[in-house]
Amino acid sequence: MKKKILSFVLTAAMAVSLVACGSATTSSSESDTSASGDSASSSASSGEILENGRYASLTVAAATDLGDLEPTSVNKDPRYYMIYNIYETLFDFADDSSGELVGVMAESYEEVSDTQWLVTLHDDIYDWEGNNITSSDVAYSFQWLIDGGNELRYDYFDSIEVIDDYTFYINWTAALPALSEAEFPLTRTIVFSQAAYEEKGNFATTPVGTGHYQVTEFTIGSRVVMEADDDWWGTPYEDQMEARHQANVQTLTFETITEASTAVVALETGTIDVCGYVPLSMMDEFESGQYSDQYSVETLTSGDFWYFAPNINNVNEDLRKALYYALDGDAIATAMGGSYVAMDSFGTTYYTDWDDSLILSDTYVDTCDTDTAQEYLDTSGYNGETLKIICLSSEEAKAAAQMAQVQLQAIGVNTEINAVNQDTYESTVIPSGSDEWDIAIASLGGSNMVGAWHLLFDNEVNDGVTTTNIDDDQLQELYEASKADATHDAEHMRACLDYVIEKGYAYPLVSISNALVYNSDISEIHYREGYYYPAAFSFSVD
C-alpha cells in the first residue's frame, strides 16, 4: 500500500553511542515584564522583521564546538540544531509526540514486504550548488556513513537498491520487531550529493547541503554563521513538513561559549539572544530579576542521563548491589554541578513513553544504605582488590567518578579512576568480553525511554551481549517486549526494569535540567525530539 501522506506510528527510539545525544522537554515561565532593572547596553539581535517576513538576525550560544560540518555529526553528537539547518534527511518525526513519521526528502513509501520498502524521492531536490539529489546520492550517502564507521542503530538495515533516479528500495535484514529500529537510517542519515562531496573532498569546513540555510562563515572553536536560502527546494513542501523546517531568521549565528557562567554574562550584556544551558541556580535574574524585561525562560528537562554500570564479567551480583547501596545519587549530582539531578528510574519525564509507575521506589536506585551495602559486600567474595572505574575525561564525568570513589571507599571497596578520551573509552569498553574495566560511568539518551535503554539492556548490541557484557535471555525477552509496538507500554517497561533491579545490572545516576533563556522578541519555541530550533522560532516585534 502506497502512503502518500507519509505517516505511520513510529515509536521514536534513540540510542546514542558513547557520546550523549541531548534532548529536552520544557515547562514555560514568562518573564515578569514589569520588573525593574537596567537594560542590556547592546543586543545581538536586530529586533527587526525584514520585508521577507524573517527576523533579521539571531545569535545563539553553543556549549560545545561543532568541530566540523561533516554530515556524520547528526549521529555523532547532540548539535542537531546546527546540522539540521545545513542538511536534510529522508524523514522526520511529527512534532506532536504522536510518533508519526513524515516525509522530508522522501515523497512517499510503500511497504513491499516485511523486509523491503519502496521509497520515492521528490524529483526537485537541489543542493546549494544546483546538484539534483537522486536515488544514487541516497545510496552513496548511506554507504559513506557506513564506510566511515559512523552508522548507529543500523541493526536491521541491509542496503539501498536503486531503481531509477527517484525511486529505490530500502532492504532490511529481517522484519522490524518495532518501527523504532528504523529510526536512525530513516531520520538521522543525512543525504547529500555525491558529485559535490567528491569535488570538495570533504564537507568539514565547506559543506554543500540541502538545508534551508547556507553556511557563510565557519571558524572552528568559535562560530558558525548561516544565511537563509530564498531558493530552498523544500518551500513547496513546507506544509507537509514540521514547523521547524521553516527559516524564520535571516542570519543565524552560533557562538561557541563552553562555560555556562560566560554565557550568562553574554546574555546580560546582550551579545547573545539564546542560551539553553543556563544553570537553574542562575535563572532568577532572567525570570524575575534585573533582566526579566528582556528575556523569557523555560526549564529544559533532558533526555540524556548518566549511569553507573559494572562489567558483568568481573563484578558478581552481590558485589554490584553492594556498590549501588553505597552510592548517594544526590551527592554525586551536587559534585557534578548545578545542572544535575539524582534519578529515580532509568529515564526522565522528558520521554514520550514516561509513566510515573516506572519510578523505582524502595530499591537501590533511591536508597543509600551502607549497612545493606556491607551485607552484600560480605557475601560477594570481595577481597579488597582494586576495581577499575572508566569514564570520559570531561569535568563532570571525573567529578562523578571521584564522588563515587569516596562513597565506595566508605564500605571498604577500593577503586582507581581512568578518565580517558572518547576513542580510548570506546576501544576499552566496546570490545565484547573486555575485562580491562570493572565499572563504567557514562551517559546515554534518546527520544523515548526504551530507546535509551538500548546499550544497557539489549543483548544484541555488542556481538551478542550488552555494552556491559550481559548475556541474559530473560532480559532480552523483556527488553524486546517493552520496545515492540504492540507491547510498548508501562506494564512491559516496568517488568523489564524490575528484572534489571533484581539482577543488579545497572544504576541510573543523574539527569540534566537547565534553563533556556531567550530574548523577548521570541514568541514561540519549536523543537525536534526535544532540541530547540532557533531558525524556526516565531517572533513578535513591536
Image (cartoon, rainbow, N blue to C red):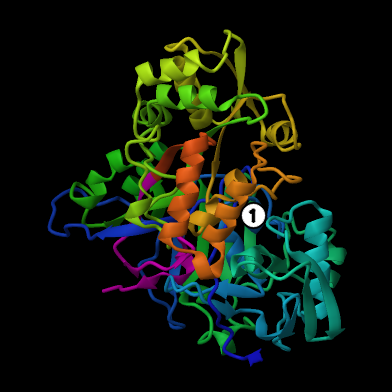
The x and y percentages for residue 533 are 47, 64
The x and y percentages for residue 529 are 49, 63
The x and y percentages for residue 280 are 30, 43
State the residue in front, 161 or 339: 161
Q: How many other residues sit within 10 Å of disc 1, few (<14), some (14-19) or many (≥20)?
A: many
Magenta-colored stretch includes residue 456:
no
Judge whether residue 261 can be spotted in this image: yes
Which amino acid does the dot numbered 1 rest on? Phe
Q: Is residue 51 above or below residue 154?
A: below
Tell me the residue at 55%/51% (across/down): 21
Q: Is residue 130 above or below residue 259?
A: below
Tell me the residue at 66%/71% (across/down): 89
Judge whether residue 257 can be spotted in this image: no
Magenta-colored stretch includes residue 515:
yes
Q: Quadrant of the N terminus?
A: bottom right
* Residue tagged 1: 218
State the residue in front, 353 or 474: 474
State the residue in front, 43 or 478: 478
In-image side of 106 versus 409 (left or right) = right
In-image side of 23 versus 200 (left or right) = left
Tell me the residue at 65%/39% (across/down): 470
In-image side of 494 versus 12 (left or right) = left
Task: Give the magenta-colored segment's residue range.
Answer: 513-542
Q: Quadrant of the C terminus?
A: bottom left
In-image side of 26 versus 126 (left or right) = left
